Amino acid sequence: MDLRHFDAWTHRSQMPAPSVSIDRLRTMPAGELVDQVHAVTAWVAATYVELPTARYGSDFLTRTVQFNEAGLPGAKTIPAISGPNGAGKSTLCHQWAANYYREQVAPFRRDGGVHRWEPTPGLTADVAPVVWVNLQANAQVAEVDVQILQFLGLGLSGVVRELSTRAVKAMIRHRVRVLLIDDVHLLNLTRNGGRDVLDHLKHLNTELGEHGGSLVLVGANLHTTSLVTDTQIAARLRVYQLKPINLDSREERERWSAVVRAAEPGLTPVLPAARTGFLDQHAQLLHDLSGGDPGHLITVLKEAAINAIITRYGTITDEILEASTVHDWRTGIRA
């Protein structure tokens, strides 16, 4: 991903929900139903369903980044989003980053596909409030800098130290306020270069901090990684943990019910037979199927919504939820 792709993604328009009445769904010819399934599949895949757990994580990122922006120059607090694989960490951060990006570029004129500003009189540069880097396994310092420069659409020649200097100067020139490193759990300090990359992240945090910027880390189960054992990182690291919700207490059961209810508005536009509170009766089964993980819950519900159209029920039932999550809709259409 580079700046122009990221900008286009953040400014995309949400397609209208492909809604039909329940009577139409139950009587339409099989060929039309196939088209409806296609449309619903595309819509639910592109729709972000925000749950309270993700909203709290977004608020945590916003507060920390705002605090860093207002703080004195120097190394800043490092916010991190952690959780099990598949918990929705990257999805949460993509949505947060898109919102933050739009807010930050709003004051600047749009030119050539992205927003532009003048770092110095007569010199224009793209405005890139967010740089997104997917850390590669066994990455080296140069590879991190190359990904930063590639995101900003800049050349990649030079020795390692020159690349690092260019990456830092480029982020300042392009008004980068957030450098987000995803898959940071892949950083392995026992391999050659791992310690160098960690030291480089500290350096980037300090350089960004001189200009009010923030380093944001995202990764699986960060509490088990080497990040938390490094004294310099640990002293500044603040982690928001996405984790499964148990049902061992009334408070936890109420919290889970609230999460389930919060998912309803993101699905009802394509479920013509759904009524307010239609997921409440499935709360226990949804917990069984998702393990209480909000990220997995959304996956289960999106698959169930598609199957609700395939089966012509128009709403989610126990039978649909208990069906295989791998459903070949091409052979499952009811004529």
Image: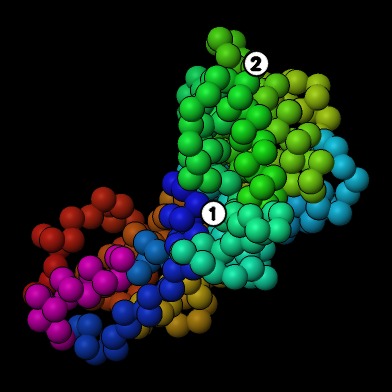
Task: Tell me residue 187's x, y (percent).
Answer: 57, 23
Residue for badge 2: 195
Q: Few, some or many C-alpha atoms within 10 Å of disc 1 (few <14, some 14-19, many ≥20)?
A: some
Q: Are marks 1 and 2 in contact (CB under 8 Å)?
A: no
Q: Which residue position holds label 1? A: 94
Q: Residue at x 69, y 45 (%)?
A: 172
Residue 276 is situated, as x and y percent measured from the top left of the image, at 50, 81
Q: Which one is in front, 295 or 167?
A: 167
- The alpha-carbon separation of the residues under discs 1 and 2 comes to 27 Å
Q: Is residue 321 magenta?
A: no
Q: Main secondary structure of the magenta part?
A: helix
Please tell me in which quadrant of the rendered image residue 217 appears: top right
- Nearest to the observer: residue 62 or residue 196: 196
Which quarter of the picture shows residue 39? bottom left
Sooner in the amino-acid sequence: mark 1 or mark 2: 1
Residue 78 visible: no
Q: Which residues are magenta?
A: 27-42
